[in-house]
Image (tube, rainbow, N blue to C red):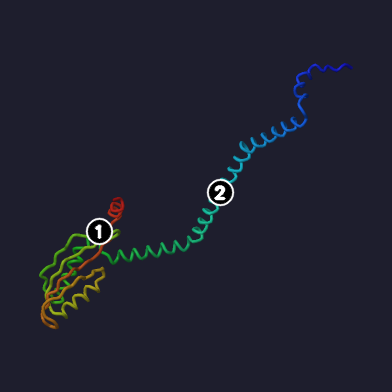
Amino acid sequence: MKIDLSHLNALRPILAVPVWQCIAGLTLLVLLLIAGYGVYFWMPMQDAITNAERDIGNQQRIYQRNLRTANDLPRKRRQFEALKEELEMARTMLPEKSQIPDLLEGVSQAGRQAGLEFETFQPLPEIKKELHAEVPVALTMTGSFLQVAFFLRTVGEMPRIVDVKNLSFSGGSGSQRLTVSGKAVTYRLLDENNTKAKAGR
């Protein structure tokens, strides 16, 4: 059998190279392949794994937080129901806007029943807060100390909240006539539209 070795002529330049250079070349080629694999495949894969582990950690923390919230939900519902009851109670103690004139008339009538004489009973502009509005009335009245005390007690016993504040006294004492100046302030809850408008500003 005759072997044709003519196709080995292309290997003659390589065969003439010393063995140590061939080994060095192969080693360099292997190192380049490893480096290329590391740069283009291994490192991106490690970055993807790190990002995935970080995302898993974030999701686990979110899950734990949501789990705590879910476990705390019954307590939050009880608090919500208690706040609703307090709000309803506040609604019964705070007048509606349409009830303000009647309430102020009740304050004036309490003063007259106590024997006080009003020199000033002037409603002032409302002062709007976050959830409620203050409805003040400027007062100037004359009467004895006992009459003033009776008036304040009567106002304090009214079913709606009325604060008498910033009182200043002048004149006599005891049964003598006093001049008393101050404010009677009642409060009303703002309706939902007013609250939203205030929040939007």
The residue wearing badge 1 is 128
Report the residue at 51% width, 56% height from top: 65
The residue wearing badge 2 is 54
Closer to viewer: mark 1 or mark 2: 2
**In front: 123, or 13?**
13
Amino acid at circle 2: Arg
Image position of 164 (left or right of 20): left
Q: What crowding class fits label 2: few (fewer than 14 Cα within 10 Å), some (14-19), or many (20 or more)?
A: few
Report the residue at 85% width, 18% height from top: 3
Residue farthest to the right? 1
Q: Quadrant of residue 119?
A: bottom left
Image position of 201 (left or right of 108): right
CA distance separating discs 1 and 2: 49 Å
Residue 29: percent from left, percent from top: 69, 32
Mark 1 and mark 2 lie on one chain; the one further toward the N terminus is 2
Kindly indicate whether the residue at mark 2 contacts the one at mark 1 (C-beta within 8 angstroms). Answer: no
Whether 80 is drawn above or below 41: the answer is below
